[in-house]
Amino acid sequence: MLRLAEHPRIVAVKDCSYDFLGVQPDPVYGVSTGFGALATRHISQDLRTRLQRNIVRSHAAGMGPRVEREVVRALMFLRLKTVCSGRTGVRPEVAQTMADVLNASITPVVHEYGSLGCSGDLAPLSHCALTLMGEGDAEGPDGTVRPAAELLAEHGIQPVELREKEGLALLNGTDGMLGMLVMALADLDTLYKSADITAALSLEALLGTDKVLAPELHAIRPHPGQGASAANMLAVLKGSGLTGHHQDDAPRVQDAYSVRCAPQVAGAGRDTMAHARLVADRELASAVDNPVVLPDGRVESNGNFHGAPVAYVLDFLAIAAADLGSIAERRTDRLLDKNRSHGLPPFLADDAGVDSGLMIAQYTQAALVSEMKRLAVPASADSIPSSAMQEDHVSMGWSAARKLRTAVDNLTRIIAVELYAATRAIELRDGLIPAPASRAVIGAAREAGVGGPGPDRFLAPDLAAADAFVRDGRLLAAAETVTGPLQ
């Protein structure tokens, strides 16, 4: 899993400030006016620093569990990227303080709830800005939560006193949802390759045919992800002594959809990821703030903080992940059903009836799949008005990102259960030799504590080992020792 706990050291930032005192007397949102529905009030110059301090304090209104450290560091880093763009009107010393806090491994305490994904991830970013002011709580390098003022002092960091526009600029962006999108894409890249491996292992364990993976079949329906997934499965199955064998009285003409259509489903998810990467790349190249300083010096209000572009792909990825988990569970169920597994013992049990085998492991996998389907309900299709109807349509992008993180976590466990079942099933095929890549995966899994066939035992530790084996990339690494890099 990709984590932003470690990062290239940020040393200095360029001059990104703007002389708001020289702005013409026309109202400038967030500089000489209040915020949201209060933007009709003119703010005199002597109250403007207080205005910026107050917006941070009042908007740091999050509730619920703490957000993960890597998410907080991601949103701070991405906000710093925008602050350094020269489009936000922030002084260099504010940006440098952000860089210093990141470099000192000081992580603001940010809470689960508080962002509607419009006008930026307001509450999460406000909690980060509060730390820059030396207020609120933060986590130190040792993982202990303490007052932010103490942590800044220990690292020789001077709290900032915000001036015109700076408070608003620190909290008006899509950085939280974007950071979670980038991390989800990195995790899903590994998981989709891992799913190709477990699908191949299941096909092998079910004595299926690899003819459906032939490149010429996928060339006539040229979706890039589908072709890549089929190529990965074919690479894993190369040299298998199990594929194509039939132990039924009547030969199978075709394998079940969950086996035969694995590249089509995984491939569609891969293509969804490609679109999401395009959106992420565009958002990473953006300077999201309101108002913004344009190259000709104008300060203009805008709606670029709306999270819809990011929210849509976050939801789209959750849908694709749910479907990938669903098809993996169907293959697992087929491996456990003696009426459909083509000669495997019921539930892959050692002594069926006395032993239950993997019966309840499939229950766990099914429960995870059911939750994945609930998580696939789009957050971005919802909107709830706020700020006295001034902010009357919001993206819910932060919520889409939070549920995608859960979906990615659950997908890892679902793939782990298929891995557990498929490797056990292959080892129960006496007299048939699996593919070299399959043997490499099984050997590495056993070394990692993922148990093989045998009488019933406490199953949770085996499943936890399988989860870790998938989660930290060892499954993919084991297969690639034989196949080379998978697509």
Image (cartoon, grey):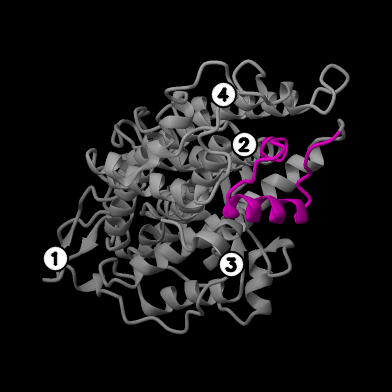
Mark 3 element type? loop
Q: Which mark is residue 134?
A: 3
**Does the magenta run of residues contain 440?**
yes
Mark 1 or 2, which is nearer the eye?
Answer: 2
Quarter the N terminus occupies:
bottom right
- Residue 207: x %, y % from top left: 56, 33
Q: Residue furthest left?
A: 296
Mark 1 and mark 3: span between their CA atoms?
A: 32 Å
Q: What distance separates the C-alpha of mark 1 from that of mark 2?
A: 57 Å
* Residue 418: numbered disc: 2
Report if residue 435 lies within the magenta region.
yes
- Inspect this view and state whether residue 201 appears: yes
Image vertical order of residue 28 relative to residue 251, above or below = below
Q: Which residues are magenta?
A: 425-454
Q: Amino acid at mark 1?
A: Arg
Can residue 34 be spotted in the picture?
no
Residue labelled with disc 4: 370
